[in-house]
Amino acid sequence: MYAKELFRAIAPYRKWWSSQASIHAGRVNEFLELAAESGCKQLFLGLESISQQSMGEVNKGFNRVDKYFELIERIHYYGIAVQIGIVFGFDHDTPNVFDDTVDFLEKAGIQNATFNILTPFPGTRLFQKMVDEGRILTRDWRKYNSREDVVYQPKQMSVAELLAGFRYANERFYSIQSITKRLFRSPVQLWWTLPLNLAYSYRWQKENQS
């Protein structure tokens, strides 16, 4: 495997690095061991959702949600922090998805997370699907930002509920209570993940007070 050869080659340079990877990276012990030895400090995993139905919706059914916890735990075992990418607003998402998602991230001891609102960008199959179903609410492309606006009609909740839930997930995940719970359960790379979490918490509170 090219990645393993790369890890062996860069290990002598003693550099720290992070990268994006599939959740399947957690399946191969040798891959994780070599990555850690070569200086890997964090892997970003685009899980998208903790719902298996939503995974099928975006043709990622090969991501087995019931295996997430085990694979994340294995990555942590090798001293590698985990950042998770989550998208809210899939057709199977209900208002419960926000608490369910943060509950999972806390239980798994996730160091960092990036939350986004599902956004049907023009030119994609998702956009055309939303057009065909009459669910596109605006063509003001400035609002296609995945963070501040909802540009389509969700199926299982209102626009206001999706936006409020997105904000709630950010606020809860980067609360002092959640930071303490997550990093205590998995204190991997605590020396830099704790300051980073506190910085995110401060920024989120400041942005939402203005």
Image (cartoon, helix red, strand yellow):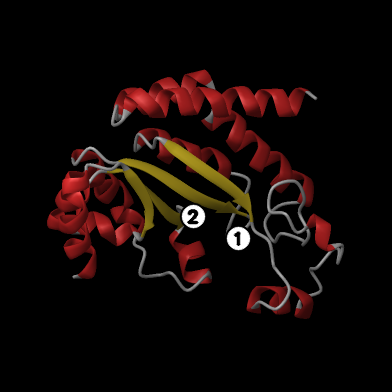
Quarter of the image for residue 66 reads bottom left
Q: What residue sits right under mark 1 in the picture?
A: 90
- What amino acid type should be assigned to the residue bearing mark 1? Phe
Q: Circle 2 sits in a helix, a strand or a loop, which is it? A: loop
Quadrant the C terminus occupies: top right
- Image position, residue 13 (x, y; %): 21, 46
Disc 2 to disc 1: CB gap under 8 Å: yes
- Image position, residue 181 (x, y; %): 39, 23
- Image position, residue 158 (x, y; %): 76, 51
Q: CA distance from mark 2 to mark 1?
A: 9 Å
User: Which of these two is toward me, 65 or 144?
Assistant: 144
Badge 2 or badge 1: first in the primary sequence: 2
Q: Residue at x 12, y 56 (%)?
A: 30
Quarter of the image for residue 184 reads top left
Residue 18: tell me if it is visible.
Answer: yes
Residue 42: tell me if it is visible.
Answer: no
In the image, farthest residue toward the front: 13
Q: What residue sits right under mark 2 in the picture?
A: 49
